[in-house]
Image (tube, rainbow, N blue to C red):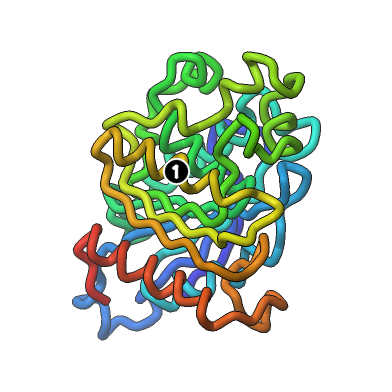
Amino acid sequence: MKFFEFIPEGIKDGTVTAWLHSTESFSEMQSYAYKRPAIIICPGGGYEMNSEREAEPVAKRYFAAGFNTFILRYAVKEKAKDFYPLCQLASAIAHVRKYADEWYIAKDKIAVIGFSAGGHLACSLGTLFNEERFLNVFGRQDDIRPNAMILSYPVITADEFAHKGSISRVSGAEIGSDEYKWFGLDKHVDAQTPPTFLWHTAEDKGVPVENSLKIAAALSAASVPFELHIFPKGGHGSSVCNMEVNSPNPYNGRWVEWSIKWLNELFEFVV
């Protein structure tokens, strides 16, 4: 295993922690080295913080399943506006693709996963990667479209079901304004949006389940493949649903295994 941190090229800050499978120290295993899919994790936190509960505990699960894994710690609070977190995530995926051969990564099998506001960030990359308004700010021609998205109780809408704090911070705009509403991502889904895995709980009071239902409806309308799971019980922010994150719920925790199987099927990946 290789473990290190880097700042993606083209941005001033925002660190990425990399967990890479490595066979370099085992010369007899070199003939078995193969390129693996990768996943970039965007923790939640309302664009106010990066939740540690949705960082390393998540990385452990996907790394154990054979994925090269990255955790993005992105800009929050006043720095969350002007597309800056999205520029950080776009730079991160471009950086991973640039070093894909060196890191034994299949550059056409890179997923993003986000939780709550991190789900908004991950989904922003999947829906805004070709938006002129964003590209004018990003200012680069890199390949930044993710090949898949996993959205965990994501912030999506900018309507009556919005998580107002998240949308206000990322938009930098007054609640209800046209600028604020533009960051409702269900309005940006098209046929180029990547295949998506979604999960939420019906009891979520922090980010209403309608956020996942509306993005699912938009994906369906655009004929984008998706898988959606709504669990009847459970609140917001349960991460991987175990004792490590103080949210033990084996029933809901099945989402991790299901999302891994979904990615394996999509990417035709066998460990």
Q: Residue at x 26, y 47 (%)?
A: 225
Percent x, y of residue 140: 45, 22
Percent x, y of residue 212: 49, 48
Q: Residue at x 46, y 40 (%)?
A: 214
Q: Residue at x 38, y 31 (%)?
A: 189
Percent x, y of residue 185: 50, 32
Q: Is residue 159 left or right of residue 81?
A: left
Q: Residue at x 27, y 31 (%)?
A: 191
Tell me if residue 137 can be seen. Answer: yes
Q: What kind of element bears circle 1?
A: helix
Image position of 234 with respect to 114: above or below = below
Q: Is residue 256 left or right of residue 182?
A: left
Residue 140 vs residue 82, the one in the foreground? 82
Percent x, y of residue 82: 66, 22
Image quadrant holding the C terminus, namely bottom left
Tell me if residue 72 can be seen. Answer: no
Q: Which residue is mark 1?
A: 93
Q: Residues within 10 Å of mark 1 (few under 14, many from 20)?
A: many
Q: Amino acid at mark 1?
A: Ile
Residue 47 vs residue 186, the one in the foreground? 186
